[in-house]
Amino acid sequence: MTHAAKQKSAGWSKARSEKKEEMKAQRAEMLREGLAVRQQAEQPEVDAKLQDQRERLGQVEGVVFAKGTSGQIRVEPGWVTLHRKGFSAAIMQGSAKGDKRIPIASISAVQMKKPGLSAGYIQLIFSGSHDSTGGAIAAMSDENSVGFQKHALPAFERVRDEIERQITARHAPAVAPAPATAQSVADEIRDLAALRDEGLVTGEEFEARKRSLLGL
């Protein structure tokens, strides 16, 4: 093979090698773009799963969560959400699936039976309604109840305590601010007099504020 032919062959080999590397780079870029699009599409679902996991672990401030056999219960400021999903929920609750949001203001009490030989349950009581007297099976078929097993008891106790705390807070009397004492009024008048003497307030402003403090 002549020198020119060798150079031409080497040129073709280099061109093929460069083309191959270019195609590999293009495929890698396409894979990265495809992965980015997929991650972006899946991100809301991932975020929802992370949020759900944080709620279960009690890592979301102001939110208390518990998962039972016939559904899940979530307590946040002012609201309780009952979520029905899965085979057990369908059997116990029939067609009552999905989310049911209940304002704390409509709940008068919360009843809980701890699991023993049978499953436990937590039940929301409303004004004018009555506590369940039909046992755990009757209570868990109520759309305002969630059944649970023994391992979930601590989470449901936290749910009960948070609901009761919010109910109590709603009915707590407002604390009126303490009235100003005679000593504090006298102190303020002395402070105002000092400001007047320093020329920081006028005599008219001093007299007007003094009359207001003394209720004149």
Image: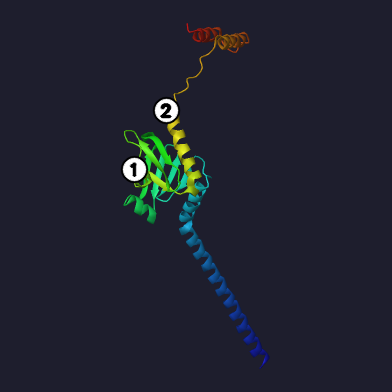
* Quadrant of the drawing holding the N terminus: bottom right
Q: Report the Cα–Cα distance between label 2 and label 1.
A: 30 Å
Q: Amino acid at mark 1?
A: Gly
Mark number, residue 171: 2
Q: Is residue 142 above or below residue 196?
A: below
User: Closer to us: mark 2 or mark 1?
Assistant: 1
Mark number, residue 11: none
Q: Residues within 10 Å of mark 1 (few under 14, many from 20)?
A: few
Residue drawn at the location 62% of the way across and 10% of the way down: 194
Nearer the observer, 168 or 204 = 168
Secondary structure of the residue carrying numbered label 1: loop
Residue drawn at the location 60% of the way across and 77% of the way down: 18
Q: Is residue 53 above or below residue 32?
A: above
Q: Amino acid at mark 2?
A: His
Q: Which residue is disc 1 drawn over?
A: 134
Residue 120: image quadrant is top left
